[in-house]
Amino acid sequence: MSPGGGVDRLGRREEMDFSPRPGPAPFPRMVAAQAAMEARLMLRNGEQLLLAVVIPVIVLVGGVSGAHHVGFHFTHRAVDVFTPGVLALAVMSTSFTSLAIATGFERRYGVIKRLGSSPLPRSGLLAGKVLALLLVEALQIAVLVVVAVILDWQPATGALGGAVPAIVVGTGAFASLGLFVAGVLRAEATLAAANLIYVLLLAAGAVVLPSSSYGAFGHVTTWLPSGALGDAMRQACLHGTVAWRDLGVLVLWAAIGTVLTARTFRWE
């Protein structure tokens, strides 16, 4: 039998068609390939892992230990208050800070430009990055949950039903905002801006601690994406309910970030 053909059941020789069929792969396959590549790059980067895992673990262990030693008083146990906030922090660190910095330097080195010349549309690039973020976040959350359980974390019944929508919508909101920052600033400016925003939201954005902990400013933090995600995670993990109001705020930020990214994102 020759490489170029075969024989059918009646003994007749049939030729195989090796002619090229140019054209892009189906959109879902392009998104899946982009997501797999993005996830591998994030997991290989030590700085990304520092933001994704090490800092949230330090905040969780330090916050719970510090609350006991300093004498902070919450309506719930310290570990039950800090854990959902740190899970929200992990989502923010990966979907905003890490994504913005990585994308900024991808633009600088011409990676985004080359993707722009491929059949992958902007929507596919965004979808691939968001899907990769969700994969990395799944690993983050698994590590943080193990640490929290060791610290005797006891989530409310039904917490998963409220936490999953918050994580998905929060990832979309922060990812769109991260791509907006990376698309309009140079790589160095993106690095500085993303880290500055991360520190500000960590300190005063009600992501780790409840909005009620900030006094009168708490009314402002409930409208920030960090405060909305943190409060949604706390309501899910402490009370086992869905924070529809906070999810609405996150959807609003996701819409704003998507529109801004679509209008301003530059491939180079």
Image: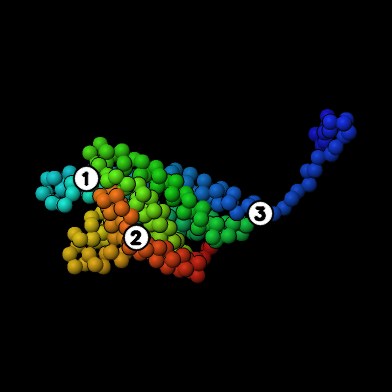
Q: Is residue 215 above or below residue 4?
A: below
What residue sits right under mark 3 in the picture? 24
Q: Residue at x 20, y 61 (%)?
A: 212
Residue 132 place in picture, x, y as percent = 47, 49
What residue sits right under mark 2 in the picture? 244
Residue 268 place in picture, x, y as percent = 53, 63
Res 1 quadrant in image = top right
Residue type for callout 2 = Trp
Residue type for callout 3 = Pro
Mark 2: few, some, or many residues within 10 Å (few <14, many ≥20)?
A: few
Q: Residue at x 78, y 43 (%)?
A: 18
- Can residue 206 be seen by looking at this rendering? yes
Q: Is residue 181 left or right of residue 114?
A: left
Res 11 quadrant in image = top right
Task: Give the mark, 1 or 3, whose residue is nearer the N terminus.
Answer: 3
Residue 131 place in picture, x, y as percent = 48, 51
Q: Is residue 262 left or right of residue 63?
A: right
Residue type for callout 1 = Val
Task: Give the mark, 2 or 3, whose residue is nearer the N terminus.
Answer: 3
In this rendered view, identify the residue nearer to me: 86 or 183.
86
- Can residue 95 be seen by looking at this rendering? no
Q: Tell me the SS state at disc 3.
A: loop
What residue sits right under mark 1 in the picture? 79
Task: Give the mark, 1 or 2, whose residue is nearer the N terminus.
Answer: 1
Res 184 quadrant in image = bottom left
Q: Are marks 1 and 3 in contact (CB under 8 Å)?
A: no
Q: Residue at x 48, y 53 (%)?
A: 129
Q: Is residue 149 left or right of residue 138?
A: left
Q: CA distance from mark 1 to mark 3?
A: 50 Å
Name the front one of labels 2 and 3.
2
In this rendered view, identify the residue nearer to me: 19 or 245.
245
